[in-house]
Amino acid sequence: MRGLTRFGTALGLLGTSLLAHAGPALDGIQQKQPTNWHAITMFCLFVALTMGITYWAASRTKSTADFYTAGGGITGFQNGLAIAGDYMSAATLLGLSAMVYGQGYDGYIYMLAFFAGWPIILFLMAERLRNLGRFTFSDITAYRLDQGKVRTMAAISSLTVVCFYLLAQMVGAGQLIKLLFGLEYKIAIFVVGLLMMFYVIFGGMVATTWVQIIKACMLLIGGTLVMVLAMSQFGFSYHTLVEKATAVHKLGPKLMYPGSLLSDPVTAISLGLGLMFGTAGLPHILMRFFTVTNAKEARKSVLYASGFVSYFFNVIFLIGLTGIIIVGQNGSFFEGGKIGGKLIGGGNMVAMHLAKAVGGNMLLGFLAAVAFATILAVVSGLALAGASAISHDLYARVIMKGKASETTEIKVSKVATICLGFVAIVLGILFEKQNIAFMVGLAFGVAAAANFPVLILSMYWKGLTTRGALWGGYGGLISAFLFVLFSKSVWVDVIGYKAPLFPYTQPALFAMPIAFGLAYLFSKLDGSDRAKAEIEAFEDQYVRGQTGFGASGAGKH
Amino acid sequence: MSSEMYEHMRANPKFQRLVARRTRFAWTLTFIVLGMFYGFVLVVAFKPAILGRPIVQGSMLTIGVAVELFMFIFFWVLTAVYVRRANGEFDELTQEIIKDAWKENP
């Protein structure tokens, strides 16, 4: 049962981003570490570099298109790195290497589940997203439907996803930074919140993308370096590595068998669906498809992104396995020097300890700085996605009905960023001691059940009407919310009831059919004239989705 | 005006060809990925012991690791195959369709 719980919380852990707040791993590691000057110096270098980029980006961020999508001038390769950066987080590095360290092969299975969504996004969504959308994914869902109602619905579910995700990030960030840098929790939260506002407000999407690209490169280099140094101790032989690892690990030969993590098929399939389609419904990921010049570049970005992600997951698998011997057999990494006891800093510190063991304090400092940079990059992307839902969808299209000037729209999104930043800081401090593991699960659940079904139906199904979209979207949102609320991770772990009302931790397998079913049913039942016009309008949308003719052009960057 | 353009494009037999080919291609690849991935998930759920066996006697490489590594590489190759065909053949066809529509609708 504990395996399942951890399995559930791990969904979040890995998610498109952050971090290590999940499950048992971070429990009871509230003690502050000595100040780590190597890490702080390297992090300051990163901040200085990204500040410089933001300064440069600010001069190129004038129109709304610059602000939301970097003027559509990002190349496929750059965007691929940025998407990979959004996807490979501190959680991937720390959480997944810890999972391989503890459970062996299960961690590897998990990584495949994270990866398998990308080809699907490419085959079914990438080019239509680029051909139909401009700034936010509601541009697509509202393309031929009632602008006001559909955008309001999409903005509400986007903001739900962004807020829960952001909060989970902030709390995780504070705890991780306390651990790695020896900074106070509150200071860490303020640093993350203020830097995030700075990047987004002054540099918009240009700065946010470059922060993400730099961080992705740092993560790839840092991870590869640790892996190569660690593998050199085994003569680069996978055979020797596994032989030694199975000999010393408490699971023995079972290390390379699927374990308890995926023993329940319902949870396994529900998690697979949630990861795959949740990713395809995350506003800050979808937004990345509007930053490239055309559908061609959009496709290339997925090719590069999935290449980097797939490579990095295999690196992490090796990091976890080498950690079993190099970290797991070294008493100095355990509390009280007791091998097999509790790792100093908690279970998620395997990759960090390994960096120290194979590369000394410099490498440890570098990797810690990478982890901090990762959090910063992800919260910036989230804040920008949230701000654009407020300024582009709610303000410019719903309230002003498309009559807002570009200057005021940008002003509104900057104010929205400041508000989101302060909300994130205040909630981050309030929730310091709370168990927030369910929040990322909720964010993925809502993305998979509220955003994804309406988005995919609006692209593929002629018969979708406003009424159907609203029922599907709100139905998915509410059911995902309730399933998570009644599941063990909130009902029992947070509220404190004895038994959960809903037996599974993953909502996707149940909430997604509800959303699709409602959207279908209410579209079919909608016999209004408006519905007929909407169905007719699909033809033009379809041609544009296929050919890209009429799609918003690229800027001149 | 752009609605007229769309009308022209839709009537173009090349458009029908583009849509038919790309749809078939994209869904075939999708089913390959989904089939392999969920097939694998079912093996994990119901017959996990198979995955722990070595690929050959005495090897440290297990079937599970080998199959997964294969999928990591194979899925990525499929994305490359799709991008190659979409950015080549399909995009050329798209350009022709747009050009034809401009000609008919100056």
Image (cartoon, coloured by chain):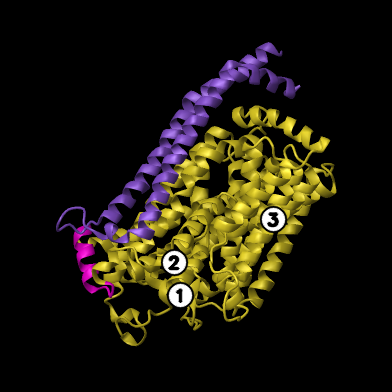
**Residue under circle 1?**
A25
| Chain that is yellow in the image | A
Q: Does residue A241 appear to the left or right of B35 in the view shown?
A: left
Q: Chain of mark 1?
A: A
Name the residue type under label 2: Gly
Q: CA distance from mark 1 to mark 3?
A: 34 Å
Please state which amino acid type lies under the numbered disc 1: Ala
Query: In the rendered picture, chain B carries what hue?
Result: purple
Q: Residue furthest left?
A: B58
Give the image location of residue B11, x and y in percent.
65, 17
Instruction: Please name the residue shown 62% across and 29% down the image.
Output: A548
Residues under numbered marks 1 and 2 in contact, where contact means CB atoms less than 8 Å apart: yes
Choose the circle earlier in sequence order: 1 or 3. 1
Q: Residues within 10 Å of mark 2 (few under 14, many from 20)?
A: many
Check disc 1: other Cα within 10 Å, few if <14, some if 14-19, many if 20+: some
| Magenta residues, start to end | A236-251
Q: Is residue A197 visible?
A: no
Note whether A298 is above or below A1 in the view shown: above
Residue found at x 66% / y 32%: A551
Which residue is the site of mark 2?
Answer: A95
Disc 2 is attached to a residue of which chain?
A: A
User: Are labels 1 and 2 on one chain?
Assistant: yes
Q: Nearer the viewer, mark 1 or mark 3?
A: 3
